[in-house]
Image (cartoon, helix red, strand yellow):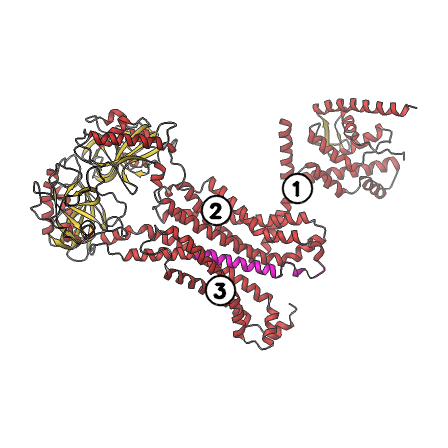
Amino acid sequence: MTRWLQRLTRRIRALVHGAALDQELSEEIQLHVRLETEDLIRTQGLDPAEARRQALLAFGGVERYREAQHDARGVRWIEDSLRDLGLAVRVLLRSPGYTVPAVLVLGLGIGATTAVFSGVDTVLGRLPYPKDEQLVRIYEQNSPTNRWTLSVADFQAIAGGAHTLSAVGAARFRRVPVSAGGEPQSIQAGVVTSGFARVLGVQPAFGRRLEPADDALGAPLVVVVSDAFARRVLGGAASALGQSIMIDGRAHTVVGVWPRGLDRLSGIRADVWPALQFTPPTRRGPFGLFVIGRLADGVTLDAGRRELADVSQRLLTQWTSDFQDRNARLTPYSLRQVILGDGARTMGVFVAAVLLVLLIAVANVASLTLVRATGRWRELSLRAALGATRVRLVRLVMIESITLAAAGAAVGLGLGAAGLRLLIAIGPFVPRLDGARLDARAVAFAILVSLVAGIVVGAYPLLLLLRHDPGASLSGGARTVGEGPRSHALRGAFVIGEFALALPLLAVTGLLLNSFLRLQRVPPGFDGERVTTVNVSLPAGRYPDDSALANFWNRLLPTIEQSGNVAAIGLGDALPPIAQQTFNQNNFDLVDHPVGEGASQPVSDWITVTRGYFATLKIPLLDGRLFTPGDTGNAPPVVLVSRTWASHYFPGEQAIGRQLIEGGCNECPRTTIVGVVGDVRYDGLHAPGEAMYAPMEEGNWGRNVHLFVRGQGPGNDALATVRAAVLAADPGVSLDRVQTMADVVGESITAPRHLVTLLAGFAVAAVALAAIGIFGLLSYTVAARHREIGVRMALGADQRAVVRMIVGGGLWYAGIGAAVGLIIALVGTRLLAETLFGVSPTDPATFVAVTLAMLGVALIACWLPARRAAATDPVRALRSDN
Amino acid sequence: MAERADLLQGTLDLLILKTLMLEPLHGWGISKRLRQLSAEVLAVGQGSLYPALYRLEDKGWISAHWGTSPEGRRAKFYTLTRDGRKQFTAERSEWRLFSTAVELVLKAV
């Protein structure tokens, strides 16, 4: 073993210090010859010149021994390869016109692919928790498309009765006012049971995590905070322990700090993680708990699902007074899938796009290499004539391709790092994408891609070498090899392929752009002009119940309304039209159209608002009446419904005056529909505007609400008035996230805008590469047919005929490519159906526009070489020897 | 000049090891010593000498270092290692067995 190691080090030394060893060897040989010479002079009396001649003769060819010595060092093939590498680098540097574009194009393709790979690797990869395949999120579900959160009763039934789960945890995520002595700030909190961190298997860096004792009602309030929060607010992670902070108006003791970088649990970000203490439930509802669990070792998801279905049955018999939906089952889903959401589809679009770009890039470089290979045939023939074996030439050509690809990989890694940052910056709409890094796996991936690219790019010259004997063709018109119709057809095929791949990418971009523009034009259902919104949080400690909240708002709202620069003010618990925000939904049963015993009740967005809300956002009243001051306290409950809601549940009928049972509460008084208002898109501009409104004044005051204020004139002073009034009433209230409604609408379409922008980047790159491909092909053709064009012109062809001929030839390739691309696109864009809004995946207008655009680009790319051809001077062309 | 015999394949290593038994030598010294010891009969084709030295060094039977020759020149000296001594003993007995066998065959009538 040590012997083997010694040898290895000697080999490496031989490789690294080859020059030094050569130096030693020649010194040794010189000494030998000199000593032999002196010996001959001394013993045989020869004159020095003759002695030296004989000594050299006796030694034999010095060069040969050097070579033999090299062989003995056992590193000959590596040395040769290194020599070839040096040669390859020199050859490539000698033709920058080929090398620079080839490396850049390859680098672009490899870089984009690597960036997307890193993103996909992170997004689809394992969650940062031990044995993440055991983690599940549990939903209530009554149909394949309708699932929602759990109630306290649900959670306690699972915690006490599910043996397939080794641990369960519950959380409520919301923004709460938090203060550590200073001004209260509205901060995202994850109020969690002790099981939450135990399920995930995460440990704090300092202190302890929550323990079961902390869950008990009345136990001292404790909190674990994020490292960032501890640094920002509590003066460092270590010193945070033991400090007391006010969360929602109640003092909590900091008992733990999460490790740095751990700012979210189960995919949801929060700065403070206070203990969640349940009051014993008096009924099955309400829902709203985010529940996760860990399957016990060896338990499958199916086994867990079966057991949870049994628990669901028991719950139905345990809580008979309300919520008797027999279809509703507690259903576990893989947490990884839940967090990923539809991120997989977005990443799929990226992957498809980037692979197309990579393929086009490789085709482009391969086409360039092909042109170059034919030109280099003469050089290779010369090398063969000088004694290089074919094996040696193959190695040379391969090393050249690999060198090119390696340079491409180096450029690609640089571009990939930048591209990944761009990918992350351009959209947090894919979960966990922000954690992506260009790591060792990404580097390995880039190297793999570049290797494959190098092989593809170098395949044609290699084929040429294998088919033809370079040694035989030096004498006889070497240039003809690789210039035949076959290689021309191959180059044409590359161009066709590039167009066939670029068109689908452009089509997808076109469809998404079309979809985005339509989305942008969707009326949100309100008039956001001069309306500003702000998030208001009242601490629960100071406002423990509804009457305290009512007291605060009933005093404040009239004051603000009477000030000069405020036209209208309203409160609501939803912020239209931000998709995937958490607002209430509620189930209901129509008295006139009941769903029947044990069946699933319909569910609707359930927005709680003040009377001024509709005037502030100018949501039109279409029928009946709005809320009145009489709809408060113990008055019979009333709701408003949106127009789409009314036509959905009462098609062709009068909705006003109808009654319903809300929230499955059979004993509660019936709720009456008193008005129909215009549709507002709450869950994103793409979603239908089906909603029900409950009055906030009716004992529904929110502690954390969106305040909307419409100014009298332009400018932001209405908000200043609000802020002053609120802080004058209570400086402990936090106001944050001030936005104009125009900004809110803009933010709601951030994700599709970023998707379109990113894809447009890919599409532009693809189309540009295709254009460069056809331009290169035609430029080469024009140069090669210089003489022929001269002959044609000499025989009377005018410039227009020449341009027609060249452009026609180019467009033929582009046309075939576009036709193939159309077929690919028509099949491929179907996968986008769910992502598109208001546009069919085979939208004819988009497809026609995209095809015309591709052909237009091709026309321009063909035009330039055609102009050059038309400028041919027939006399000069005929005189030249090519 | 005396007649010179070509070296039998494989014996060169043995002879080199033998010349180094007494003292470290440089390349030319080895070839000179070989010629002297064999009464000018055995001549190492110098072309094989240096690759052989390298090979032996590679196998760890001899080691090389730079020093000053008796003639006062910088030269690379080769020294027998412990492994080399063992190898020499082994190869010598092998050679003896072989040459005795050849001799027996040749003596037979």
Residue A239 seen in the figure: no
Using the image as rendered, state which of residue A142 and residue A571 is in the foreground: A142
Residues shaded magenta = A474-503
Disc marking residue A861: 3
Answer with the quarter of the image where residue A167 lies: top left
Residue A184 placement, left or right of B68: left
The residue pinned by badge 2 equals: A413
**Residue visible at 46% across and 59% down?**
A768
Specify few, some or many for label 3: CA neighbours under 10 Å numbering under 14, 14-19, or 20 or more.
many
Tell me residue A799's x, y (percent).
Answer: 53, 74
Where disc 3 sits, the SS reads: helix
Judge by depth and name the residue closer to the eye, B22 or A283.
A283
**Residue indicated by mark 1:** A77
Total numbered labels: 3
Give the main secondary structure of the magenta stretch. Answer: helix
Residue B102 within the magenta-colored segment of the rendering? no
Amino acid under disc 1? Trp
Q: Tell me the mark number nearer the camera, choosing from 2 and 3.
A: 3
For the residues labelled 1 and 2, the Cα–Cα distance comes to: 30 Å
Task: Say few, some or many: other residues with alpha carbon within 10 Å of mark 2 (under 14 / 14 to 19 / 20 or more).
Answer: many
* Neighbour tally class for label 1: few under 14, some 14-19, many 20 plus, Cα within 10 Å: few
